[in-house]
Image (tube, rainbow, N blue to C red):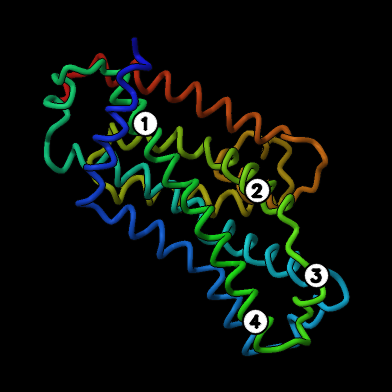
Amino acid sequence: MLLSYIPASFRIEILKTRNTSALWLTFIGSLFAPAILFIGYLSKPEIGYAGAKINAWDLFIGRCWQAEIAVFIPFYAVLMNSLIVNIEHRSNTWKYVFTQPFPKSSVWVGKILLIQSLILLHFLVFNSLTLVAGGILALIDSNYGFANHIPSFDIILKFIVKTFIATLGVSGIHYWLATRIKNIIVPIGIALMGIVLSSVLIMQQWKYVDWFPYAFPLLSSMRKSNDFLVLHEWVSLGYFIVLNVLGYLDISRRNMG
C-alpha cells in the first residue's frame, strides 16, 4: 500500500522545490571543487605536472574529491535536509500535508527520496564538471599528462558510492532535526561544530571516531580499503535507517499545526 503512494509523494516534493534554492545549490555547489583545482593548476602548473608520471586523471579527480569532501559535502547534505523540510515550516503547512489522502509515511519517505536524489544529482554533476575541467586543462597544457591516460571510472563510481553512504548518517540526524527546529541556522551551526570537531578527533586518532557521523565523509576519503564498505560506512547506513524510523514515529505522534 505504501509503495503505491510514494511516486506521487515524490513528484509533489519535486514541485515544491521550484520555490527554493535547493536545485540551484545542487548545480552551483558542484562547480566549487573543480573550479578551485582548475584555477590552482593554471596558477601553479607544477602542482599538476606530477600527473604526467602517474595517472593525471586519477590525481586530478582525487584532489577534487578531497576538496569536495573536506569543504562542501557535509554542509551540502545538511542544507538539503534543512531546505526541503523548511518548506513546510515556512508556509506552516505540516498539518495540511498530513491531512492529504496520502499515508504520513509516504510524505516522510517522499522527502527522504528527494533529498537523497538531489545529493546523488550533485555527485553526478560534480564528476561531470571535474572531467570537463580536466579536459580543458589537457588542451591548455600537455605537460599535465591528461592525454597519456584515461579517467578510472571505477574509482569515480567507488568515490560516489562510498561518499554517498558516508553522508547518510548526517542526513539521518539533520532530517529529524529539521522537522523539530524551524530555524534553519540552528542545524547549520550544529553541523559546523560537528565538522570542526570531527577534524580534531581524526587528527587525535580517537578510537571511537568510526561512530561520529560528521567524520564519516572525511574518513571515506582518507582510508583505502578493498572492502565494499568499511565500519564507519556501515554505521552511517545504520544511523540513517534507525534515525529515520525514530524521526517518523516522532513526527507522526506530534501535533504539527
User: What is the distance, in whole Å, between disc 2 and disc 1 at their CAs?
Assistant: 25 Å
Looking at numbered disc 4 in the image, what kind of residue is underneath it? Leu
Q: What residue is shown with label 3?
A: 149
Q: What residue is shown with label 2?
A: 201
- The tag earlier along the polypeptide, 3 or 4, is 4
| Mark 2 or 1: the one toward you | 1
- The tag earlier along the polypeptide, 4 or 2, is 4
Looking at the rendered structure, which numbered label has been put on residue 137?
Answer: 4
Residue sitting at x 28%, y 35%: 11
Looking at numbered disc 1 in the image, what kind of residue is underneath it? Trp
- SS class, disc 2: helix
- The tag earlier along the polypeptide, 3 or 2, is 3
Looking at the rendered structure, which numbered label has been put on residue 176?
Answer: 1
Quadrant including the C terminus: top left
* Drawn side of residue 156 relative to residue 111, left or right: right
* Drawn side of residue 127 relative to residue 229, left or right: left
- SS class, disc 1: helix
Q: Position of residue 118 (x, y in %)?
A: 42, 46
User: What is the distance, in whole Å, between disc 3 and disc 4 at their CAs?
Assistant: 13 Å
Label 4–label 2 contact, CB within 8 A: no
Query: Looking at the rendering, which quadrant does residue 69 occupy?
Result: bottom right
User: What is the distance, in whole Å, between disc 3 and disc 2 at their CAs?
Assistant: 37 Å
Residue sitting at x 75%, y 35%: 228
Label 3–label 2 contact, CB within 8 A: no
